[in-house]
Image (cartoon, rainbow, N blue to C red):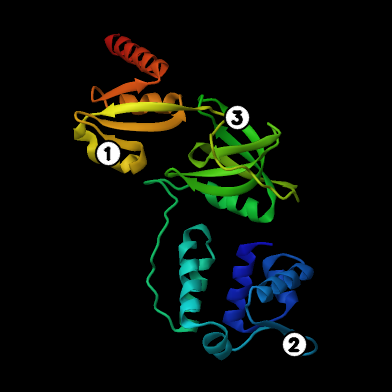
Amino acid sequence: MSAERLFKILNRLIDKNTCTAQELAEELEVSIRTIYRDIDTLTLSGIPVITTQGKGGGITLLDNHIINKTFLTSVEQEQIIMALQSIQNTSASSSELVLKLKNLFRKDTTNWIEVDLDDWGMTNNVFEILREAILEKYVVELSYWGLSGKNTIRKVKPARLVFKGKAWYLQGYCLNRKDYRTFKLVRIEKAQITEERFTDILNPPKIISEDDSNYEKVILHFDYQYKMRILEEFMESQIQFLDNWIEVVMEVPIDTWIKGYVLSFGSHVQVIEPTHLRQEVEEEIKKMIENISH
């Protein structure tokens, strides 16, 4: 079942009121049986859709009066519109539907949330490709950059998209590794839907680590002049204000990211734990000095 297709069917019924299963099947490029399954889904969800046989029959959305005054309360109407608004940036077809439902319900709700999935000055269709693959159960092929800086090609059964710790992740079953894996979206150079489909019910574990990395406890001390940056980048539970330093305790992989993060503070940070991270940062500083000297 495709949420995108359900949106399109409901949008079409609101616009035209009545149409045939054949018309919907041709427009959406699916079978008539699939259309009837979608209509059953809409009906079970509480949308008043009926089907009539014979000449002049078809699939019909009950009149506005039933939807507007009997079926949904005013609060429920607003909740539907606000829920759709919250996913407009992840579904190209929902924006028009939101507008039509506003007119149908005679509502002028506040657009209370906006999610922009593009980086500054950049566009990337990876999110939309993965979303489609998840809903339609297609295997995807990823060109992926690991933490080590190595690019690999992975074939994945995509399960879900997760927003965690200021970043988007894809969780899925990696056919290369024969196990569940987590992929950071910004490291996916290219995503392509294959012709291979799957029927498995995927149940990936909660995100604990990424790219098979082991997390370690890291303790850093920062100068107070970086207080605002620390408050923006870490949770309150990770921060402790000491007499002369701001202490941050976190669990992260010891990789190029954490070393680069520490170096970005220059002389205004101390690595308290672990010792080997401090040593690795010192080595990086020596290499930087050598590179600058040449």
Which numbered disc, 2 or 1, marks the residue that appears first in the sequence? 2
Figure quadrant of the C terminus = top left
Callout 3 environment at 10 Å: few (<14), some (14 to 19), or many (20+)?
A: few
| Residue located at (29% from left, 37% from top) | 230
- The spot of residue 182 in percent (x, y) is 57, 38
| For residue 283, side relative to residue 53 (left or right) | left
- Residue 26 versus residue 261 in the image, above or below: below
Helix, strand or loop status at disc 2: loop
Instruction: Look at the numbered discs 1 and 3 and tell me whether their residues touch, using CB distance below 8 Å.
Output: no
Read off the residue under disc 2: 57
Read off the residue under disc 3: 152
Which numbered disc, 3 or 2, marks the residue that appears first in the sequence? 2
Which amino acid lies under the numbered mark 3 shown in the image of this protein? Thr
| For residue 242, side relative to residue 47 (left or right) | left
- Residue 179 versus residue 96 in the image, above or below: above
- The spot of residue 43 in percent (x, y) is 68, 76
Looking at the rendered structure, which numbered label has been put on residue 229? 1
| Residue located at (61% from left, 76% from top) | 12
| For residue 50, side relative to residue 263 (left or right) | right
Callout 2 environment at 10 Å: few (<14), some (14 to 19), or many (20+)?
A: few
Callout 1 environment at 10 Å: few (<14), some (14 to 19), or many (20+)?
A: few
Place residue 154 in its image quadrant: top right
| Residue located at (23% from left, 31% from top) | 242
Which amino acid lies under the numbered mark 2 shown in the image of this protein? Gly
Q: Nearer the viewer, residue 65 or 28?
A: 65
User: Can residue 235 be seen in this snapshot?
Assistant: no
User: Can residue 33 be seen in this snapshot?
Assistant: yes
